[in-house]
Image (tube, helix red, strand yellow):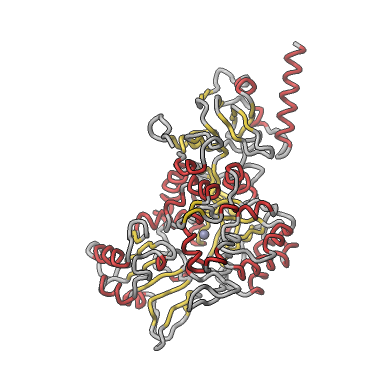
Amino acid sequence: MPMQHLRFLLALSAFVVIGAAHRSLSAEETAPVEVIYHHAHVLTMNRDNAVCEAVAVAGGRIVKVGTNVEVTRLASANTRMVDLGGKTVLPGFIDGHAHPSRAVRMTEKYVDGRFGTTPSVTAVLAKISARTAQTPPGQWIIVAGSSSSQTRFAERRLPTRGEIDAAAPANPVMFLNGAHEAVVNTAGLQSLSITKGMHELKGARIGLDAQGEPTGVIQEGMVIFPDLRIPDQDLRRYYAKVIPEQWNAHGYTSVYAITPLQEMGVLRELATQDAPTLRYTIAVFTDPGGKFLPPSFEGLSLPSGSDANWYRVAGVKVWADSDVPMRGGAVSEPYAGPNGGHGLLNLSQDELDVLASRVQGAGLQFLVHATGDRATAMALTAFERSRATAGGKPLQRIEHFGEFMLGSDDLLRAQRLGIGVNVQPAWIATLANSTIENLGAERARGAFRFRSMIDAGLEPGFGTDVTGIVLETLDPFLHLWAAVARTSDVGTFVPAQAVSVTEALRMMTIWAARAQGEEDSKGSIEVGKLADMVVISEDVTAIAPAALRALKVLKTIVGGRVVYEAGGQAAPAS
Ligand SMILES: [Zn+2]
């Protein structure tokens, strides 16, 4: 048997070489193979972007990657063989930044005031009026609107406090202009105890007219949001069932959930129960500036007995600024147009520095939302100053890094510091027009520079940032298509900043994993990693950029198990 022996040794050495980057072989990798996915076009997203044909799984992890012959050789009588008929397989998509409980809440409970279905202020008011018929007087009506609705509605403005009063005289109403701004009617102001002359409430900024009367416009009002506390029985259902189903159906196997502190009780409870079909990495937040975070982060840890591969508390998030689409991102040069302004900072440099050290010192990742160049520079400075407390671990990250604008040395500083960055490529498709209106055509050309980021040595991780406001951004192929084809709401947007299909896929898999400190277990199809994969409808490497938009998920596999399967057999033509 010398030949067989030699083959075994060769196989073993390949095994060890591939696995060595992560860890040495464990018992589960030498356990009997449970399932083999074969006759596939597997884009592994490993360091060399290797392509192979088959994957073997044992104990929820990948134990072999290779040709059909190499992998099927490991089959025993109990191994389930799944022939994928030549379909393309990718590592499971990682949604590196989302607000899933809020997104589900919004779609289940709130009036749909999104631009796609609601083209004008008149249409929004009619929907509010219709909802009053089903809502007892005094009960809140919340309307989910698209961010930057003032640039989208036919009237080119938001509904006013007075107009909403007329549509809903007996109910408090809040119209959400995206996640960072809202318009509230008179009953709503009363319900929130906002009175004349009050310009701030728990950090929320209240718009006042010349007489000191509240205009109804509230910025950064999440702290006083009337439906902030989602009831526990709803949260249990969302996290255990609704979110996994929705995310799995789009090919996601992991989500970095940006989670309000008050949801931790339910997550702690779920973490000791049956594993869901989606892996949760969790970052908590309170108010935008982080002033109400608990004095100690020890209370955030999950109970012993919970499995970090399913639930892991990994970070704390603050918003350094508001958001560029609402002209709230902190910018160094004023916004375009007569009312310009420099946007809104939620905390000072000193406060950000202190918080960075505190969070990183606790071993948690500090996620800083920064959309304007002034906020981005502040975040980079805080990361420079707090670097020692990160101890060389990937604990420093900027959310929406440079998406709307980059300062002249931002790329260099970010690369030198080795900080993680998270971006939303689909915003090219949904926010190019508003970016031009808000920043002016010339400055807007500096938005969405993913090519420059990669060329500078950054590895941007992707996240949907789904909040329930723009539902189509849950579709990973919208992000892939936007990153590669640069198709936007104003035509092709700065095509020189396009990235390749492989680069975009790396953003959605291995770079997203790396940006949340999980590359040892996720993000590529390699021996030793969790067996999280997605089977898609077409060979993504062989179709035209325009066709990327129409790709579909056929199967989502988590821990080796198929958790989502598209109805019907045929892949839709693209
Ligand atoms: Zn977000």
Percent across and percent down for residue 5 are: 75, 16
Left or right of 104 on screen, residue 138: left
Q: Which quadrant, please, contains the N terminus?
A: top right
The vertical placement of 548 against 203, above or below, is above
Percent across and percent down for residue 397 are: 64, 58
Looking at the picture, tell me which residue is in the foreground, 422 or 441: 441
Q: Quadrant of residue 182?
A: bottom left
Q: Residue at x 39, y 58 (%)?
A: 106
Q: Quadrant of residue 408?
A: bottom right
Can you name the residue that lies furthest to the left here?
Answer: 133
Looking at the picture, tell me which residue is in the foreground, 301 or 293: 293
Can you name the residue that lies furthest to the bottom here?
Answer: 211
Percent across and percent down for residue 110 are: 35, 60
The vertical placement of 334 against 120, above or below, is below
Looking at the picture, tell me which residue is in the foreground, 346 or 296: 346
Left or right of 266 on screen, residue 71: right
Q: Residue at x 46, y 57 (%)?
A: 490
Is residue 271 visible in the rendered structure shown here?
Answer: no
Q: Residue at x 47, y 76 (%)?
A: 205
Percent across and percent down for residue 309 are: 59, 44
Is residue 317 visible in the rendered structure shown here?
Answer: yes
Tally of numbered tags: 0
Q: Which quadrant, please, contains the C terminus?
A: top left
Can you name the residue that lies furthest to the top here?
Answer: 1
